[in-house]
């Protein structure tokens, strides 16, 4: 009997919506207004996927482990993980999979055939319980698919001009570098993620397409999405308008929301160019032409201390820069208000706040909350204009929280986000037996999980080892910042943060001053995910009908086999049936075979439920914003891609609709029906002596050709094809092939970019685990990524190794 790869679930967080503030009077009003209301828009559950990397080539697998980090239903309600892969530009769903979830954990893979066009994709995941939750949410990870042979088209931007509009030419060439004359060219230009202009044109004989967009100085970032198509060749890609990198803009973040006349305040700032990249600058902030603060942003972020003056006129002077300032974005100076100063917003048990006020009275209300729950509410009677407050945080869980100040009319005056419990975050230490390895040499790891105080902590984790160039830090997420920041992002309070790790305390302090700057925003009542119609039947189900369309006279018996046992079930009077989850759990590559178990079975037909497909299509069409933050550069390393093993075979089921696509394929007729397929989709591979069973009708690579696999007698039920219905079920995790070159050393090169993947490893009672695997023939730097859970929360760890000749 198939078993889940997961034997334990150590951690699940679930928050109730309540308030510990005393009720009555203004307390009750403010709690109801800012907590009860806001909590209605909080997500019901939180799902996270750890993937092995974020950059793939054809004929690779996307390996993943799913963690249900928060839930408001019983764990038994979450039994299926639904995953889809869709193109970010065309929104086409190119791959899907359903996987068994037990105790909030699941694992699986999606194969990438060479039929998927190169480009950026969204990996989207959700559970079967979304139709039962109040505010369901999905997990989304952006990945890239690249090919060593290059894209079918190349688009270069040139001859740009700036007047009242931005004008440029798109030069379009094909793979052979000839003009792509006659190709269709569809484009959309976005400014700050809002559509500015869209058009459809034909590439001229000179290979050019003219584009013109109205200039808007308020737009900080611009990019263009293009789709080029000619005959069967297709390119769909997002192109940054890199020629705009000389135009920069500032964004300012006063610590508590506003500049108030005469009240000193810290203010962070961010500088980006119009292609969206962070810009390093030096300069001065001027008041009436006189310098009042030095501006320095080495990585696009900086911090100043300033006492605003409502009578001053502020401007920016840049030193030795060839950049053009299109927007200084300097905040207005208000004549009245409140300023907060929190020197240490990354704290543990107490928050120290300096409060300064001007012209707003002396009665205030203070609230500590996280938009799901209120933790501390108290009135404040101010005798002077300044107060030093010590706010206890004992009742708060670790993570983001917000300190908000209201006036006597319960209007927000100032706000500051802080992070509680940094020192309590668990850590995973990865110790390698060496830092440098040779090809096909053994790597031994020692893993140790510890709590914030360094004490051993048992847990469960997934771990990957992949070529570092395949781990794009601007997109690859981390379970720790995801867990602590994701709720604020989902509610629209802060932008999506590029979180490869939670970073040092210093990094987190700057993050709180910039990316986590809320300025008493209200949660979004409707976001794109909330607008999805979740009221769908996601079960594996169908309806039996008479071929003559007459009403059924009685319920019909239906049998399913391929999973556990040979269950027989009866439809209801209308012919509807739904398989229980335990009936649909399958081993990888198996199918759920469904037949009508009646003597006159040929008089019936089955219409299967496709509501999940329509939901996947709707989710694929949503806009998923890219993470904001400093951008690392992921070079398109052609040499590295050429080194990575790729094959031309694609695993799909042979069917009538695929015949035109694949043409005439050779047939491999098995004599024993005991054939296997290795991890590289090679039938009876000489390099690997075992694998998964070959599937009837599958397309495999065999002796340099693509063949259709056939085993006579494999279909034991025979008969007309329409009497036997093959369905995909919910799958247990497929085993990742781990080479053991000491036991078997194949002669052919092996250069897969993911050399190790384990969907779950459980530590001992001391929080320790030992792992070993082999490098292959690919050299370079590899990144080890560990993510998991324990009784104290989420945990992650990183380590690098180098492989040489």
Image (cartoon, rainbow, N blue to C red):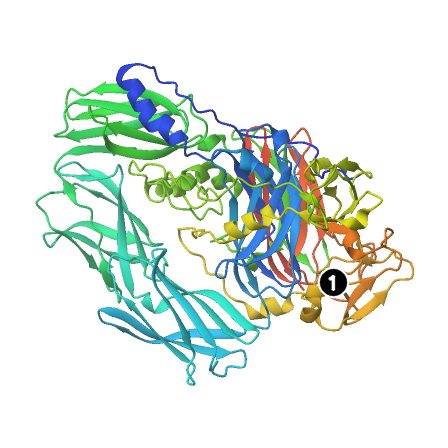
Q: Quadrant of the N terminus?
A: top right
Q: Where is 788 relative to 319, above or below? A: above
707 on left or right of 394: right
What is the residue that sits farthest to the bottom in this orientation? 205
Q: Residue 317 falls in which quadrant of the image? A: bottom left
Residue 361: image location, x then y, percent? 14, 25
Q: Position of residue 449 (x, y in %)?
A: 60, 35
Q: Position of residue 600 (x, y in %)?
A: 82, 46
Residue 794 visible in the displayed image = no
Residue situated in front as seen by the camera: 52 or 625: 625
**Residue most extreme to the left:** 311
Residue under numbered circle 1? 654
Q: Quadrant of the C terminus?
A: bottom right
**Residue 659 on image: x %, y %:** 71, 68
In terms of image quadrants, where is residue 343? Answer: top left
* Relative to 627, 265 lies left or right: left
- Residue drawn at (45%, 27%) of the image: 397
Which residue is nearer to you in this view: 269 or 113?
Answer: 113
Q: How many marks?
A: 1
Seen in the image, is 729 located left or right of residue 790?
A: right
Query: At 63% across and 66% down in the image, what residue appears?
Result: 115
Q: Residue 17, can we see it?
A: yes
In this rendering, position of residue 439 left or right of residue 340: right
Task: Check the image and report above or below for 380 versus 624.
Answer: above
Q: In terms of secondary structure, where does tag 1 sit?
A: loop
The crowding category of the residue bearing disc 1, from other C-alpha atoms within 10 Å (few below 14, some 14 to 19, many at least 20), is some
């Amino acid at each position: 009997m198939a078993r889940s790869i997961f034997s334990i679930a150590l951690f699940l967080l679930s928050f109730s919506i309540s308030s510990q503030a005393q009720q009555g009077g203004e307390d009750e009003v403010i709690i109801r207004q800012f907590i009860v209301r806001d909590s209605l828009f909080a997500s019901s559950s939180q799902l996270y996927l750890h993937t092995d990397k974020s950059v793939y080539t054809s004929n690779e697998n996307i390996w993943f482990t799913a963690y249900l980090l928060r839930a408001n239903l019983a764990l038994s309600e979450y039994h299926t993980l639904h995953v889809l892969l869709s193109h970010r530009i065309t929104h086409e769903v190119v791959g899907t999979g359903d996987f068994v979830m037990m105790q909030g954990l699941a694992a699986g893979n999606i194969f990438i055939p060479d039929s998927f066009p190169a480009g950026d994709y969204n990996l989207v995941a959700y559970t079967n319980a979304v139709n039962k939750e109040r505010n369901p949410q999905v997990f989304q990870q952006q990945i890239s698919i690249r090919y060593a042979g290059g894209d079918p088209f190349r688009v270069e931007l040139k001859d740009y001009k700036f007047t009242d509009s931005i004008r440029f030419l798109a030069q379009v060439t094909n793979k052979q570098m000839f003009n792509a004359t006659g190709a269709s060219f569809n484009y959309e230009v976005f400014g700050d993620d809002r559509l500015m202009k869209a058009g459809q044109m034909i590439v001229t004989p000179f290979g050019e397409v003219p584009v013109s967009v109205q200039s808007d100085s308020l737009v900080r970032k611009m990019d263009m999405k293009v789709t080029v198509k000619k005959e069967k060749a297709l390119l769909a890609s997002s192109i940054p308008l890199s020629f705009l990198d000389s135009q920069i803009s500032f964004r300012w973040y006063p610590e508590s929301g506003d500049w108030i006349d005469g009240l000193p305040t810290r203010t962070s700032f961010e500088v980006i160019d119009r292609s969206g990249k962070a810009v390093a600058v030096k300069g001065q902030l001027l008041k009436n032409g006189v310098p009042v603060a030095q501006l320095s942003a080495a990585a696009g972020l900086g911090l100043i201390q300033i006492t605003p003056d409502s009578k001053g006129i502020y401007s920016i002077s840049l030193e030795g820069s060839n950049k053009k300032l299109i927007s200084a974005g300097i905040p207005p100076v208000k004549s009245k208000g409140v300023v907060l100063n929190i020197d240490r917003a990354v704290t543990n048990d107490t928050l120290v706040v300096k409060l300064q006020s001007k012209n707003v009275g002396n009665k205030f209300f203070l609230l500590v909350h996280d938009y799901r729950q209120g933790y501390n509410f108290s009135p404040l009677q101010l005798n002077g204009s300044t107060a030093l407050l010590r706010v206890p945080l004992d009742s708060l869980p670790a993570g983001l929280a917000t300190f908000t100040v209201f006036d006597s009319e319960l209007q927000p005056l100032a706000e500051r986000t802080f992070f509680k419990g940094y020192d309590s975050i668990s850590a995973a230490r990865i110790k390698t037996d060496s830092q440098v390895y040779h090809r096909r040499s053994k790597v031994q790891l020692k893993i140790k999980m510890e709590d914030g105080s360094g004490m051993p902590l048992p847990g469960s984790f997934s771990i990957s080892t992949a070529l570092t160039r395949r781990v794009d830090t601007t997109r690859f997420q981390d379970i720790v910042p995801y867990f602590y920041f994701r709720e604020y992002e989902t509610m629209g309070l802060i932008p999506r943060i590029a979180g490869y790790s939670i970073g040092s305390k210093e990094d987190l302090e700057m993050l709180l001053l910039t990316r986590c700057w809320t300025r008493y925003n209200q949660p979004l009542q409707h976001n794109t995910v909330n607008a999805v119609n979740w009221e769908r039947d996601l079960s594996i189900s169908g309806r039996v009908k008479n071929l003559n369309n007459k009403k059924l006279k009685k319920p019909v018996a239906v049998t399913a086999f391929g999973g556990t046992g040979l269950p027989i079930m009866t439809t209801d009077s209308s012919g509807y049936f739904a398989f229980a989850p335990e009936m649909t759990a399958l081993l990888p590559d198996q199918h759920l075979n469904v037949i009508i178990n009646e003597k006159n079975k040929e008089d019936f037909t089955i219409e299967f439920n496709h509501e999940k497909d329509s939901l996947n299509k709707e989710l694929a069409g949503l806009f998923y914003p890219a993470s904001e933050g400093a951008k690392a550069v992921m070079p398109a390393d052609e040499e590295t891609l050429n080194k990575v093993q790729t094959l031309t075979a694609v695993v799909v089921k042979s069917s009538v609709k695929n015949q035109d696509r694949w043409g005439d394929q050779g047939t491999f007729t098995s004599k024993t029906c005991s054939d296997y397929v290795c991890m590289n989709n090679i039938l009876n591979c000489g390099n690997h002596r075992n694998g998964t069973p070959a599937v009837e009708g599958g397309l495999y690579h065999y002796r340099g050709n693509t063949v259709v696999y056939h085993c006579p007698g494999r279909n034991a039920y025979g008969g007309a094809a329409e009497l036997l219905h093959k369905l995909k079920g919910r799958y247990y995790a497929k085993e990742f092939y781990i080479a053991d070159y000491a036991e078997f050393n194949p002669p052919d090169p092996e250069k897969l970019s993911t050399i190790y993947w384990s969907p779950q490893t459980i530590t001992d009672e001391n929080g320790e685990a030992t792992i070993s695997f082999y490098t292959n023939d690919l050299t370079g730097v590899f990144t080890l990524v560990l993510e998991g859970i324990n009784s104290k929360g989420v945990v992650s760890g990183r380590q690098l190794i180098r492989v040489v000749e």
